[in-house]
Amino acid sequence: MAVAKPSPFNPDKTPHRLTMKGISKGFPGVLANDNVSFDVRPGEVHALLGENGAGKTTLMNILYGLYQADSGSMSINGEPVQFRSPKDAMREGIGLVAQHFHLARRHSVAENIALGLKGTPLIYPVKALEQKIRTLGTSYGLAVDPKAKVWQLSPGEQQRVEILKALIQGAKILILDEPTSVLTPQEAESLFGVLRRMRAEGEAVIFISHKLDEVMEIADRITVLRKGAVVATLDKKEASPESLARHMMGKAVAPLRPKTKPPLDKAVLELNNVWVKNKRGMSALKNVSFKLRHGEILGVAGVAGNGQADLIEILTGLNQPSEGHILLEGKDCTPLGVKGLFEAGVAHIPEDRNHMGIVPSMTVAENLVLRQYRYQPFSRLGLLDWSKVTEFAQTSISDYQIATPSKETLTRLLSGGNVQKVILARELSGEPKLVVAAHPTYGLDVSATALTHDLLLKQRERGAGVLLVSEDLDELLKLSDRIAVLFAGELMGIVDASRTSREAIGLLMAGRKAQA
Amino acid sequence: MTFLGYKLEPRTKPPGQVVFLYSFAAVLVALIITGFIFMAYGLNPFSAYATIIQKTLLNWRGFSQVLLKSVPILLAGVGLVLAFRAQFWNIGAEGQILAGAAAAAGVALFLPLPAPLTLPAMFLAGFIAGGLWGFLPAILKVRLGVNEIITTLMMNYIMLYIVRWLINGPWKGKLVRGFSESDKFPAQAVLPTFVGTRLNWPTLGIAILFVFFIFFLLSRMKLGFEIRMMGESPEAAHYAGVSFLTTTVLLVLLSAGAAGLAGVGEIAGIHKKLLEPTSISQGFGYTAIIVALLARGNPLATLATALLLGWVFASGDVMKVALRLPDQMTGVINGLLLLCIICIEPLLRYRLVRTKALPNSKFKETV
């Protein structure tokens, strides 16, 4: 079956590995896929690009047999096919690496791959497999120890297991759904290496993403979906990030608001020798001191789990430092809780926006006052004034262009970008002195990301201090005045964003102190 | 998954009519099954129901019995609605009813108060005692994370034995000879009733007022907003700066206090003495759970659901006397009701839709 050697392909002469023609799929109230045609050739990485809700996942679920299309047809290697379940799809050589992994965490890599594999012997099911995993692993650059337990693996390694699983099941068409969302920049780079080798081996890869840069880096062809329909299918050579963004959104992205004035000299936030203990009693932050000035965006970089979450918790009152002091405009606010810090002018854009940032079962109007309901004018003598809440909701919805059927709509029905707009509208409404933003654009589409960036820059212009924690280095470099890097709870250094590089930050993130 | 061309699809939120219709159907199914039980006893279910309806709904004396049984489960039930909205699973209404009854009895028997103050003092004492009986589980939950289902349930038994100890020990009546009960309350500690019935109107009034108060609390008051936040997303409530301790203690005081009021009504209105705990409350605290669940978090709906369960209790008496069915029929019907209500849960969360492919032409219009 394998299409010979890693020699260069001539894609135009080989028949399409997969053709989807005129696929439509409706759900109550939405047409998720509208007459979509899509194909993949062997030896090609075909990116499926689109904002959240553009219909990428629906299309792939149809291909993987999870949904049945209302109309349209599919063929593999020219043969018409119909999938009633993922089993049918797998039999035809389709493998899916989902955004969230489906692995049994207590079992080994080999055991996970053996699970559901046809022809697995009843006794010692994994013996023969281990060798196969090693050979396949080396040939594709997907090295994993077959005996390792899944819970010991990093997200990047777990993803490799998923890819290996698909390959061993005989996948000839591999679907990767937002594969880089859980990876560090280095891990993403090594994934692209794997994909390049698979391309050379004649595999067909469908790469789903909403990130323009990585699509430009890895794809051979790019199909852009918008509102369920194909807007364009382009060769990489004809595409540019700008043209792709325009196709995705139907309009050009506004350039970032320029920074017109430098930060003021006065510090809005000051941390003095702060130590924090986490739930297991270990030091999560060690002797951290820094100043954040009015009108400044201080980025915080670091590999996930190096103390960023703990820093956010003490700044927003969800936790207290075990030692040291937090000063807000020179006043000690260390012991203030959530309420006290909010009253002192600290806005918090939380990382987990659906569980912490909103109450999903409450209306948009209610969520817009989730933190200020207890103050005038929204409440007086223990009674809520719903007319004031409604008024505030109306202004917020129009000011922040929150796409919601009404202010009485349950917030869980909104898209991720609109949920974030609700949170931003609420947190920024009181003209805060300090904005603590945790991964504010994680998982958002291009236009919601642009809006979030613009709002944070606006706060900076206004003279607020912004502490921006993000795992997206490009975002940090674009927005921050300075970038602080955390490693194992220690502050490795603070660098000037305009005079640093990804590499320099990468070294700090890996725990190497900055040279003076 | 499709089956015979139909499949289940999750609903975003079931519309009000659907909830009502399905709940009504669930009640109907439970009553139909009860009909078969009548048949097993050799009764014609239609004439059995006719007798029950005639004796409970079609004359004032009968209907006053329905109201009489509805009052305690309405008070306790609306209290539970409040607790359940905050995800505080108070299973302890039974004990809280008894706590209220015991405290009111203490006031009636031993506190020399001017006559017009006695009844208000009894209600106040009952409310506080009920509330305090819920206080300990509330503190244990917020401070130590102890599961309130277990603590509130266990507190029921503690109060049951406290009341038994009272009526056999220190509060045993001097004039009752062998019986385990207190002396009769003085006249100033007995609630007035509607003429010709045993139904006392003050507790009925308090119960209805309390229902509207809880409705107002949840929809208009700051505390109600905090209770809903805490119940619907604890993480967001922390983030918003809601004090879990204050909010939980307040809501439990109200929830358990309501049950305490129900206890006062039972002894000051009907029994006029403190007596065997299973006679003070015939499982009203547990029935209140059904009242609250059937009301689905809506305090006003308890007016209807408490009436329904009150009717079941009153029918139980009719079945015993007129149809010679055993006492346990009330429990059987309550159980069937609860079972049927739980069974419609999936229907409220999902709906059946046809999986027929939509015709192509439909898409062309939208393109």
Image (tube, rainbow, N blue to C red):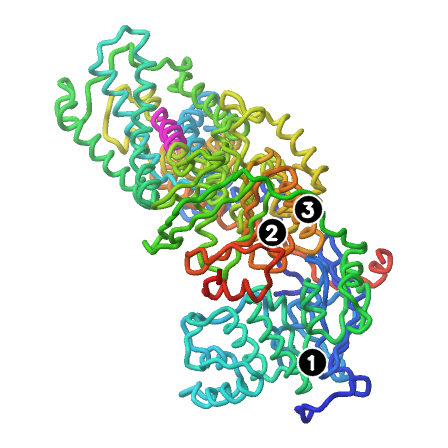
Q: Residues within 10 Å of mark 2 (few under 14, many from 20)?
A: many
User: As displayed, is residue B311 above or below residue A226?
Assistant: above
Q: Decide which of B168, B48 is in the foreground and name it.
A: B168
Quarter of the picture holding the N terminus of chain B: bottom right
Q: Are marks 1 and 2 in contact (CB under 8 Å)?
A: no
Give the numbered dot on residue A259. 3
Give the numbered dot on residue A204. 1
User: As displayed, is residue A390 above or below residue A34?
Assistant: above
Name the residue at 29% across, 35% down: B136
Quarter of the picture holding the C terminus of chain B: bottom right
User: As displayed, is residue A414 above or below residue A499?
Assistant: above
| Label 2: element kind | loop
x%, y% of residue B335? 41, 45
Residue range (magenta): B249-262
Q: Which residue is mark 2?
A: A480
- Answer yes or no: is residue A64 visible: yes
Label 2 resides on the chain identified as: A
- Indicate the quadrant where residue B97 lies: top left
| Residue ranking furthest to the bottom | A4
Q: Amino acid at mark 3?
A: Lys
x%, y% of residue A29? 73, 52
Q: Amino acid at mark 1?
A: Ala
Q: Earlier in the sequence, mark 2 or mark 3?
A: 3
Label 1 resides on the chain identified as: A
Same chain, labels 1 and 2 = yes
